[in-house]
Image: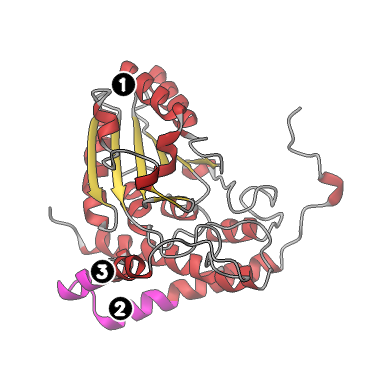
Amino acid sequence: MQYSKKFLVNLYQTMVRIRLCEESLVEPILKEEVRCPVHLYCGEEAIATGVCAALSETDYIFGTHRSHGHYLAKGGSLKGLISEIYGKETGCSRGRGGSMHIIEPEKGVMGAAPIVAGTISLALGTALASKIRKEKRVSVSFFGDGATGEGVLYESLNFAALKKLPVLFVCENNFYSTHMPIRECRPNNDIFKIGKSYDILSLKVDGNDVLEVYEAAQKAVEACRNDDGPVFIECVTYRLRGHVGPDDNIHGTHTDIRPEEEIKEWRKKDPVINFEHFLLNNNILEKGDIDEIRKQIEKEIKDAHLFAKNSPYPEKSELKKYIFA
Protein backbone atom coordinates (compact mmCIF):
# COMPACT_ATOMS: atom_id res chain seq x y z
CA MET A 1 0.00 0.00 0.00
CA GLN A 2 1.10 3.57 -0.70
CA TYR A 3 1.11 6.04 2.17
CA SER A 4 1.56 9.79 2.21
CA LYS A 5 4.53 11.29 4.00
CA LYS A 6 2.16 13.11 6.35
CA PHE A 7 0.46 9.85 7.37
CA LEU A 8 3.76 8.05 8.04
CA VAL A 9 5.15 10.97 10.02
CA ASN A 10 1.96 11.13 12.10
CA LEU A 11 2.35 7.44 12.94
CA TYR A 12 5.95 8.03 13.99
CA GLN A 13 5.07 11.07 16.08
CA THR A 14 2.36 9.13 17.91
CA MET A 15 4.71 6.23 18.67
CA VAL A 16 7.46 8.56 19.89
CA ARG A 17 4.98 10.53 22.01
CA ILE A 18 3.85 7.33 23.72
CA ARG A 19 7.43 6.06 24.26
CA LEU A 20 8.79 9.34 25.59
CA CYS A 21 5.74 9.84 27.79
CA GLU A 22 6.24 6.41 29.35
CA GLU A 23 9.98 6.88 29.80
CA SER A 24 9.38 10.29 31.42
CA LEU A 25 7.48 8.52 34.22
CA VAL A 26 10.38 6.29 35.25
CA GLU A 27 12.15 8.84 37.45
CA PRO A 28 8.98 10.15 39.18
CA ILE A 29 7.98 6.55 39.94
CA LEU A 30 11.37 5.68 41.40
CA LYS A 31 11.39 8.91 43.43
CA GLU A 32 7.86 8.03 44.63
CA GLU A 33 6.52 11.32 43.33
CA VAL A 34 4.01 9.11 41.54
CA ARG A 35 2.33 6.83 44.08
CA CYS A 36 -0.24 4.91 42.04
CA PRO A 37 0.67 1.66 40.22
CA VAL A 38 1.86 2.47 36.69
CA HIS A 39 1.99 -0.13 33.91
CA LEU A 40 4.20 1.21 31.13
CA TYR A 41 3.37 0.59 27.45
CA CYS A 42 7.00 0.62 26.25
CA GLY A 43 7.47 -1.86 23.41
CA GLU A 44 3.81 -2.08 22.44
CA GLU A 45 3.40 1.36 20.84
CA ALA A 46 2.78 0.06 17.32
CA ILE A 47 -0.50 -1.60 18.33
CA ALA A 48 -2.29 1.42 19.78
CA THR A 49 -0.88 3.64 17.03
CA GLY A 50 -1.81 1.34 14.16
CA VAL A 51 -5.30 0.54 15.40
CA CYS A 52 -6.26 4.10 16.33
CA ALA A 53 -4.96 5.42 12.99
CA ALA A 54 -7.71 3.36 11.34
CA LEU A 55 -10.44 4.87 13.55
CA SER A 56 -12.44 8.08 13.37
CA GLU A 57 -12.72 10.47 16.30
CA THR A 58 -16.28 9.28 16.97
CA ASP A 59 -15.26 5.62 17.30
CA TYR A 60 -14.90 4.20 20.81
CA ILE A 61 -11.97 2.48 22.49
CA PHE A 62 -11.80 0.65 25.82
CA GLY A 63 -8.56 -0.14 27.62
CA THR A 64 -6.82 -2.08 30.34
CA HIS A 65 -4.36 -1.53 33.18
CA ARG A 66 -1.73 -0.69 30.49
CA SER A 67 -3.56 1.92 28.44
CA HIS A 68 -1.53 5.14 28.26
CA GLY A 69 -0.70 4.24 24.66
CA HIS A 70 -4.35 3.69 23.70
CA TYR A 71 -5.34 6.99 25.30
CA LEU A 72 -2.62 9.02 23.54
CA ALA A 73 -3.04 7.30 20.18
CA LYS A 74 -6.77 8.14 20.21
CA GLY A 75 -5.98 11.81 20.82
CA GLY A 76 -6.23 12.02 24.61
CA SER A 77 -4.71 15.04 26.34
CA LEU A 78 -1.08 14.57 27.38
CA LYS A 79 -1.51 17.06 30.23
CA GLY A 80 -4.68 15.27 31.32
CA LEU A 81 -2.89 11.91 31.39
CA ILE A 82 0.21 13.07 33.28
CA SER A 83 -1.90 15.03 35.76
CA GLU A 84 -4.06 11.96 36.40
CA ILE A 85 -0.98 9.84 37.11
CA TYR A 86 0.12 12.44 39.66
CA GLY A 87 -3.38 12.33 41.19
CA LYS A 88 -4.22 15.95 40.39
CA GLU A 89 -7.61 17.61 39.93
CA THR A 90 -6.63 18.58 36.36
CA GLY A 91 -6.25 14.91 35.43
CA CYS A 92 -8.51 13.24 32.89
CA SER A 93 -10.33 11.49 35.77
CA ARG A 94 -9.97 14.50 38.09
CA GLY A 95 -7.21 12.77 40.02
CA ARG A 96 -9.55 10.07 41.29
CA GLY A 97 -8.47 7.23 39.04
CA GLY A 98 -4.72 7.24 38.56
CA SER A 99 -2.82 5.46 35.80
CA MET A 100 -5.25 2.57 35.38
CA HIS A 101 -8.50 4.55 35.20
CA ILE A 102 -8.16 7.00 32.31
CA ILE A 103 -10.94 8.38 30.16
CA GLU A 104 -11.67 11.08 27.58
CA PRO A 105 -15.13 10.59 26.06
CA GLU A 106 -14.72 13.64 23.80
CA LYS A 107 -12.02 11.70 21.94
CA GLY A 108 -13.80 8.34 22.12
CA VAL A 109 -11.65 7.05 25.00
CA MET A 110 -14.46 5.49 27.02
CA GLY A 111 -12.35 4.23 29.88
CA ALA A 112 -9.72 1.81 31.08
CA ALA A 113 -9.85 -0.51 34.06
CA PRO A 114 -7.37 -2.87 35.74
CA ILE A 115 -9.78 -5.78 36.08
CA VAL A 116 -8.61 -8.41 33.58
CA ALA A 117 -11.11 -8.50 30.68
CA GLY A 118 -13.14 -5.92 32.60
CA THR A 119 -13.91 -3.61 29.66
CA ILE A 120 -14.56 -6.20 26.94
CA SER A 121 -18.27 -6.38 27.70
CA LEU A 122 -18.45 -2.56 27.80
CA ALA A 123 -17.14 -2.37 24.23
CA LEU A 124 -19.75 -4.97 23.34
CA GLY A 125 -22.43 -2.72 24.82
CA THR A 126 -21.43 0.38 22.87
CA ALA A 127 -21.21 -1.71 19.69
CA LEU A 128 -24.77 -2.94 20.30
CA ALA A 129 -25.93 0.65 20.83
CA SER A 130 -24.23 1.72 17.61
CA LYS A 131 -25.92 -1.12 15.71
CA ILE A 132 -29.36 -0.22 17.08
CA ARG A 133 -28.86 3.47 16.27
CA LYS A 134 -27.36 2.71 12.83
CA GLU A 135 -24.42 5.03 13.62
CA LYS A 136 -21.67 3.08 11.81
CA ARG A 137 -19.52 3.72 14.89
CA VAL A 138 -16.91 1.08 15.71
CA SER A 139 -15.95 0.01 19.23
CA VAL A 140 -12.50 -1.40 20.02
CA SER A 141 -11.68 -3.55 23.00
CA PHE A 142 -7.97 -3.75 23.82
CA PHE A 143 -6.97 -6.59 26.15
CA GLY A 144 -3.94 -8.69 26.98
CA ASP A 145 -3.30 -12.39 26.53
CA GLY A 146 -4.28 -12.93 30.18
CA ALA A 147 -7.87 -12.00 29.31
CA THR A 148 -8.19 -15.17 27.25
CA GLY A 149 -8.59 -17.00 30.56
CA GLU A 150 -11.74 -15.04 31.42
CA GLY A 151 -15.20 -16.25 30.47
CA VAL A 152 -16.54 -12.80 29.60
CA LEU A 153 -14.35 -12.75 26.48
CA TYR A 154 -16.04 -15.86 25.09
CA GLU A 155 -19.53 -14.67 26.01
CA SER A 156 -18.81 -11.36 24.29
CA LEU A 157 -17.41 -13.03 21.18
CA ASN A 158 -20.49 -15.23 20.91
CA PHE A 159 -22.96 -12.36 21.31
CA ALA A 160 -21.01 -10.08 18.97
CA ALA A 161 -20.94 -12.79 16.30
CA LEU A 162 -24.62 -13.56 16.78
CA LYS A 163 -25.66 -9.92 16.34
CA LYS A 164 -22.89 -9.01 13.85
CA LEU A 165 -21.79 -6.11 16.01
CA PRO A 166 -19.27 -3.44 14.92
CA VAL A 167 -16.69 -4.35 17.55
CA LEU A 168 -12.99 -5.01 17.11
CA PHE A 169 -11.36 -7.35 19.65
CA VAL A 170 -7.64 -6.53 19.85
CA CYS A 171 -5.51 -8.93 21.87
CA GLU A 172 -2.07 -7.53 22.75
CA ASN A 173 -0.20 -10.78 23.23
CA ASN A 174 3.07 -10.04 25.06
CA PHE A 175 3.41 -13.68 26.18
CA TYR A 176 3.12 -13.00 29.92
CA SER A 177 0.13 -12.70 32.22
CA THR A 178 1.82 -10.58 34.87
CA HIS A 179 4.78 -12.95 35.40
CA MET A 180 3.28 -16.21 34.13
CA PRO A 181 4.44 -17.23 30.63
CA ILE A 182 1.72 -18.02 28.13
CA ARG A 183 2.91 -21.63 27.77
CA GLU A 184 1.76 -22.20 31.36
CA CYS A 185 -1.67 -20.65 30.69
CA ARG A 186 -2.73 -22.02 27.33
CA PRO A 187 -2.31 -25.33 25.47
CA ASN A 188 -2.42 -23.43 22.15
CA ASN A 189 -0.62 -20.11 21.74
CA ASP A 190 -2.41 -19.06 18.55
CA ILE A 191 -4.87 -16.81 20.33
CA PHE A 192 -6.45 -15.51 17.11
CA LYS A 193 -7.99 -18.96 16.55
CA ILE A 194 -10.38 -18.21 19.43
CA GLY A 195 -12.33 -15.92 17.14
CA LYS A 196 -12.59 -18.54 14.40
CA SER A 197 -14.63 -20.73 16.76
CA TYR A 198 -17.37 -18.10 16.50
CA ASP A 199 -17.09 -17.65 12.70
CA ILE A 200 -15.41 -14.29 13.28
CA LEU A 201 -12.82 -12.89 10.87
CA SER A 202 -9.63 -13.51 12.87
CA LEU A 203 -6.17 -12.19 12.08
CA LYS A 204 -2.69 -12.53 13.57
CA VAL A 205 -0.18 -9.75 12.97
CA ASP A 206 3.26 -8.59 14.03
CA GLY A 207 2.30 -6.18 16.80
CA ASN A 208 5.68 -4.45 16.50
CA ASP A 209 5.09 -3.46 12.87
CA VAL A 210 2.86 -0.39 12.89
CA LEU A 211 1.97 -0.62 9.19
CA GLU A 212 1.00 -4.28 9.46
CA VAL A 213 -1.18 -3.45 12.46
CA TYR A 214 -2.74 -0.49 10.62
CA GLU A 215 -3.57 -2.53 7.52
CA ALA A 216 -5.24 -5.24 9.60
CA ALA A 217 -7.14 -2.65 11.64
CA GLN A 218 -8.25 -0.79 8.52
CA LYS A 219 -9.61 -4.05 7.08
CA ALA A 220 -11.35 -4.80 10.38
CA VAL A 221 -12.88 -1.34 10.74
CA GLU A 222 -14.17 -1.43 7.18
CA ALA A 223 -15.80 -4.81 7.85
CA CYS A 224 -17.46 -3.45 10.99
CA ARG A 225 -18.80 -0.37 9.20
CA ASN A 226 -20.24 -2.64 6.49
CA ASP A 227 -22.08 -4.78 9.08
CA ASP A 228 -19.59 -7.61 8.58
CA GLY A 229 -18.20 -7.42 12.10
CA PRO A 230 -17.02 -8.37 14.61
CA VAL A 231 -13.28 -8.91 13.96
CA PHE A 232 -10.59 -10.43 16.19
CA ILE A 233 -6.94 -9.36 15.84
CA GLU A 234 -4.06 -10.90 17.77
CA CYS A 235 -1.05 -8.57 17.88
CA VAL A 236 2.16 -10.34 18.87
CA THR A 237 4.37 -8.02 20.92
CA TYR A 238 6.55 -7.73 24.02
CA ARG A 239 6.80 -5.26 26.89
CA LEU A 240 10.25 -3.76 27.35
CA ARG A 241 9.68 -2.60 30.93
CA GLY A 242 8.44 -4.37 34.04
CA HIS A 243 4.90 -5.62 34.48
CA VAL A 244 4.25 -2.69 36.78
CA GLY A 245 6.67 0.21 37.08
CA PRO A 246 10.01 0.56 35.27
CA ASP A 247 11.49 -2.76 36.40
CA ASP A 248 10.28 -5.87 38.18
CA ASN A 249 13.61 -6.31 39.95
CA ILE A 250 13.84 -3.23 42.14
CA HIS A 251 13.81 -2.95 45.95
CA GLY A 252 15.71 -6.21 46.18
CA THR A 253 12.81 -8.28 44.88
CA HIS A 254 13.37 -10.35 41.74
CA THR A 255 10.03 -11.06 40.14
CA ASP A 256 10.82 -10.87 36.41
CA ILE A 257 11.23 -14.48 35.31
CA ARG A 258 11.81 -13.59 31.66
CA PRO A 259 15.16 -14.88 30.36
CA GLU A 260 17.70 -12.13 29.66
CA GLU A 261 18.35 -13.53 26.20
CA GLU A 262 14.65 -13.33 25.38
CA ILE A 263 14.48 -9.68 26.41
CA LYS A 264 17.63 -8.95 24.41
CA GLU A 265 16.15 -10.52 21.27
CA TRP A 266 12.92 -8.55 21.59
CA ARG A 267 14.83 -5.29 22.04
CA LYS A 268 16.05 -5.82 18.47
CA LYS A 269 12.38 -5.69 17.43
CA ASP A 270 11.72 -2.35 19.15
CA PRO A 271 8.77 -0.95 17.16
CA VAL A 272 9.81 2.69 17.50
CA ILE A 273 13.42 2.18 16.46
CA ASN A 274 12.51 -0.15 13.60
CA PHE A 275 9.92 2.27 12.20
CA GLU A 276 12.45 5.06 12.52
CA HIS A 277 14.88 3.00 10.42
CA PHE A 278 12.12 2.43 7.86
CA LEU A 279 11.50 6.16 7.53
CA LEU A 280 15.21 6.95 7.19
CA ASN A 281 15.96 4.12 4.77
CA ASN A 282 13.08 5.16 2.50
CA ASN A 283 14.09 8.84 2.56
CA ILE A 284 10.83 9.87 4.18
CA LEU A 285 12.67 11.61 7.01
CA GLU A 286 16.26 12.65 7.62
CA LYS A 287 18.19 12.40 10.88
CA GLY A 288 17.60 16.10 11.52
CA ASP A 289 13.85 15.60 11.17
CA ILE A 290 13.93 12.74 13.70
CA ASP A 291 15.86 14.89 16.18
CA GLU A 292 13.43 17.79 15.74
CA ILE A 293 10.37 15.58 16.28
CA ARG A 294 11.85 14.13 19.46
CA LYS A 295 12.90 17.56 20.72
CA GLN A 296 9.41 18.94 20.17
CA ILE A 297 7.71 16.00 21.90
CA GLU A 298 10.18 16.12 24.81
CA LYS A 299 9.15 19.76 25.36
CA GLU A 300 5.44 18.81 25.28
CA ILE A 301 6.07 16.15 27.91
CA LYS A 302 8.21 18.42 30.08
CA ASP A 303 5.45 21.06 29.97
CA ALA A 304 2.86 18.40 30.88
CA HIS A 305 4.86 17.31 33.96
CA LEU A 306 5.29 20.94 35.02
CA PHE A 307 1.56 21.55 34.55
CA ALA A 308 0.75 18.45 36.61
CA LYS A 309 3.12 19.31 39.44
CA ASN A 310 1.69 22.83 39.67
CA SER A 311 -1.90 21.59 39.63
CA PRO A 312 -3.90 21.14 42.85
CA TYR A 313 -4.86 17.83 44.40
CA PRO A 314 -8.59 17.13 44.78
CA GLU A 315 -10.08 18.71 47.91
CA LYS A 316 -10.46 16.35 50.86
CA SER A 317 -14.00 17.65 51.27
CA GLU A 318 -14.81 16.12 47.86
CA LEU A 319 -13.78 12.61 48.85
CA LYS A 320 -17.25 11.22 48.16
CA LYS A 321 -17.94 13.31 45.06
CA TYR A 322 -18.51 11.35 41.83
CA ILE A 323 -19.30 8.19 43.81
CA PHE A 324 -22.54 6.43 42.91
CA ALA A 325 -24.35 4.69 45.74
Q: Give the distance between the C-alpha atoms of the residues marked 3 and 2, in whole angstroms.
A: 16 Å
Quarter containing the C terminus: top right
| Percent x, y of residue 111 | 54, 41
Report if residue 278 lies within the magenta region: yes
User: Could you say whether the residue bearing mark 2 is in a helix, strand or loop?
Assistant: helix
User: Could you say whether the residue bearing mark 3 is in a helix, strand or loop?
Assistant: helix
Q: Determine whether 114 is above or below 126 in the image.
A: below
Q: Determine whether 31 is above or below 169 in the image.
A: below
Q: Amino acid at mark 3?
A: Asn
Q: Earlier in the sequence, mark 2 or mark 1?
A: 1
Is residue 59 in view?
Answer: no
Q: Residues within 10 Å of mark 1 (few under 14, many from 20)?
A: many
Name the residue furthest left.
1
Report if residue 106 lies within the magenta region: no
| Percent x, y of residue 170 | 35, 41
Q: Amino acid at mark 1?
A: Ala
Name the residue furthest right.
317
- The magenta stretch is 277-295
Q: Residues within 10 Å of mark 3 (few under 14, many from 20)?
A: some
Q: Nearer the viewer, residue 265 or 233?
A: 265
Which mark is in front, 3 or 2? 3
Q: Determine whether 254 is above or below 150 in the image.
A: below
Q: Nearer the viewer, residue 146 or 323?
A: 146
Identify the residue position indicated by label 3 in the image: 274
| Percent x, y of residue 260 | 38, 70
Q: Are marks 2 and 1 in contact (CB under 8 Å)?
A: no
Identify the residue position indicated by label 2 in the image: 289
